[in-house]
Image: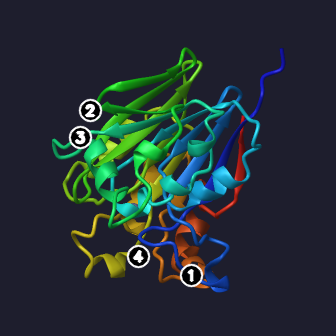
Amino acid sequence: MKSVTDNLIFWGTRGGLPSGDVASAKYGLATSCVELAVSDRHIILDAGSGISLFGKQMEPNSTKAIDILIGHFHYDHLIGLPFCAPLFTGNQPVRIFLPELDGRPGIKAIDKLLSPPLFPITRQMFADSVHFHSFKPGETLTLSPDILVSTSLFPHPGQNCGYRLQKSGEDILCYISDIENTGATTLDDVIAFNKDSTHLIIDSSYTQEEIKSRKGWGHLNLGDIEFIAKALPDVQIFMYHHDIFKSDSQIDTDSKQLLSKYTNVRIAQQFEKIQLA
Ligand SMILES: [Zn+2]
């Protein structure tokens, strides 16, 4: 049987806040959310405002499973959850995987954000087909007999969990948003975690100049991306989690030198669909 092509779809590429105007529309206005669409399920990485766009285009009668993996609980990675239509229709089995970060169960963060007076919708209003699963980073998640997900902690205020997706025994995608280069081994850890993945989606919020005044904010800079790109020449790297105050032309200008030097690096664009072999 001919194998079905897997698609990578960027539903949200910004960090911090869903914001911007037409001058920043190419690189995206919605916050973190990436889909890996495989034959039997939608695998969703983070539930920023972009997940509302994923839900909006879903066929109402679809019964295909949805697995949502949350990297951490800052609101730019969660705010789309109560706007994701399939969580309310009940037609599709939905699993939401929550890492334990800083010793705290993730469900507490969900209940804090999704409760009055911060928001009128609580998780009890989701359909019965929605289930939450907690795990400790370092564990391997089995989404199906065919799909395994390795997990690992990375430095970010409050910690962040990175994911490596393996399908039919092959590493295909590594997702790390957000991460700051805080120690001597941070970037080596990223490179080692990526292992044999062919695609890496990673935080690239700042320039090397900007990071000087933004230490502790939890993000990488373009110098870090260059280090990773050099070490992983065969990996397609997507720069992701763009700063909300940057226009498309500013991001292009900032990245120009890096992109001309490393053909394995590109800038993630909202609504971009990539066919994985
Ligand atoms: Zn973020």
Which element carries disc 4, helix, strand or loop? Answer: loop
Q: Earlier in the sequence, mark 1 or mark 2?
A: 1
Sequence-wise first label, 4 or 1: 1
Indicate yes or no: mark 4 CB to ligand 1 under 8 Å: no
The amino acid pointed to by label 1 is Gly
Amino acid identity at mark 3: Pro
**Label 4 sits on residue:** 207
213, above or below 100, in the image: below
Towards the viewer: 27 or 238: 27
**Which residue is rendered at x = 56% and y = 67% of the image?**
30
Q: Could you tell me how far apart the alpha carbons at marks 2 and 4 are, in whole angstroms?
A: 32 Å
Callout 2 environment at 10 Å: few (<14), some (14 to 19), or many (20+)? some
Residue closer to the observer: 54 or 210 = 54
Disc number placed over residue 136 in the picture, else none: 2
Is tag 3's residue or tag 1's residue first in the polypeptide sequence?
1
Could you say which quadrant of the image residue 38 lies in? Answer: top right
Determine contact: label 4, label 3, CB under 8 Å. no
Residue to which mark 1 is pinned: 20
Density class for disc 3 (Cα within 10 Å; few <14, some 14-19, many ≥20) is: some
Question: Mark 4 touching mark 1, by CB under 8 A?
Answer: no
Dot 3 corresponds to which residue? 105
Q: Residue sitting at 77 percent across and 43 percent down? A: 59
Give the mark, 2 or 4, whose residue is nearer the N terminus: 2
Marks 4/3: CA–CA distance: 34 Å
> Which label sits on residue 250?
none
